[in-house]
Image (cartoon, rainbow, N blue to C red):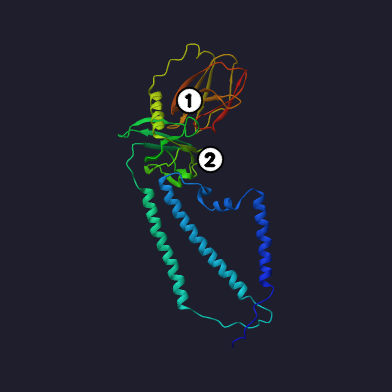
Amino acid sequence: MSMPPRSRTGPGPVAALVIVGLVVLPTVIALAATGITPQRAWDSFFPLGGATPATDRSHSVRTLYDIVFYIAVAIFLLVEGLIAWTVLRYRRKPGDDELPPQTHGNNLVEVIWTAVPTAIVLFLFVLSWQTLNTVEATSQSTVHVRVIAAQFQFQFDYLDEQGNTRFTQFLPSGQDGGMVIPTGEPVHVSMLSNDVIHAFYVPQFLFKRDVVPGRENVFDFTVDEPGTYRGQCAELCGIGHGAMLFEVRAVERAEFDAWLQAQIDKANATPAPAPSGDAAGPVLEISAANVAFNTDALQAPAGTPFTIHFKNDDPNVPHNVEIKDAGGASLFKGDIITGPKEASYPVPALAAGSYPFICTVHPTMTGTLTVQ
């Protein structure tokens, strides 16, 4: 039995608007009080907070993300809008004691809600395939860097055209460390792992690639502008995973060539013999294993040179001993050695006091040298 037309007016819409206002307005005020502007709130929905991607491949990834995001926003607004309209338009009123006429099946609507999602999926499939081909594309490159990941550090080998190592960068970050590359031209990267699965991830590159034991993964990219781009391991690889960070420093080609040649010359230079007096004094014993020093406390006499006998028991892992002052400035830095290996570091005389010592490659390896 059909029902007579019903009045759709009433306090419902006004109450709904009041409720929405009571929720939205305090939220906007709270965000504004914390310094979050509408632009910042909008940028938070995008990778890098709205910043420009840094490589040629990352632009394609960002474009794909934007298209997917705007399609999702349109679907969200359409669905939520229809739900809100339906709730308000067909809400139950006082005196509505019978069901309204029921509609069962609508061929046109069913065709629409089947065809539209199918078209969207096919469109995104084609676009994703094109983006993947762009990211995976190879290029002719004169710069080949081999990334070796191990618990818990990255090292970077710079290779010649025959695949021979010209120079190894043991420091993954810092003023003297990081993966240094030229801008505006392709860089070829190959990756190896000595132990477990790691990942090479640079957020501003919009790129992540796993480093799998027993398998060499490769990729190419070109950095657009000079700068320092922070990266990290993005696969949980053990207790020191959080400290497995690195930097990619992009510089102009001339600066890169000068830097690389200087590093090669330094690595090939014959070290000068230590002065006879430098190795005098007591010998302090310290070793490294499982990415940790065997002690966090050393003692040495004030005003007297001494020697640190360092033993690296971590196979294929680089370590050293660096002594700093209270302000963090380096007072002595021993040569980095890859285990298993031993080295004797002649340390000049230090004034009385407490000095932190670390492994330059693994800053989480720390201790205190007491000089008295």
Return the x and y of residue 4 as percentages of the image width and height: 62, 86
Please indicate whether residue 142 sits to the left or right of residue 176 in the image.
left
Q: Which mark is residue 171?
A: none
Q: Is residue 4 above or below residue 171?
A: below
Q: Is residue 69 above or below residue 52?
A: below
Q: Nearer the viewer, residue 248 or 193?
A: 248
Residue at 40%, 28% in the rendered image: 258
Give the secondary structure at mark 1. Answer: strand
Q: Nearer the viewer, residue 21 or 234?
A: 21
How many residues crowd mark 2 within 10 Å: few (<14), some (14–19), many (20+)?
some
Q: Which mark is residue 242?
A: 2
Return the x and y of residue 261 as percentages of the image width and height: 38, 27
Q: Quadrant of the N terminus?
A: bottom right
- Which residue carries the number 1 mark? 311
In the picture, residue 180 is in which quadrant?
Answer: top left
| Residue 370 visible | yes
Return the x and y of residue 203 as percentages of the image width and height: 48, 45
Residue at 39%, 49% in the rendered image: 135
Please indicate whether residue 350 sits to the left or right of residue 252 in the image.
right
Please indicate whether residue 75 sits to the left or right of residue 253 in the image.
right
| Residue 296 visible | no
What amino acid is at disc 1? Lys
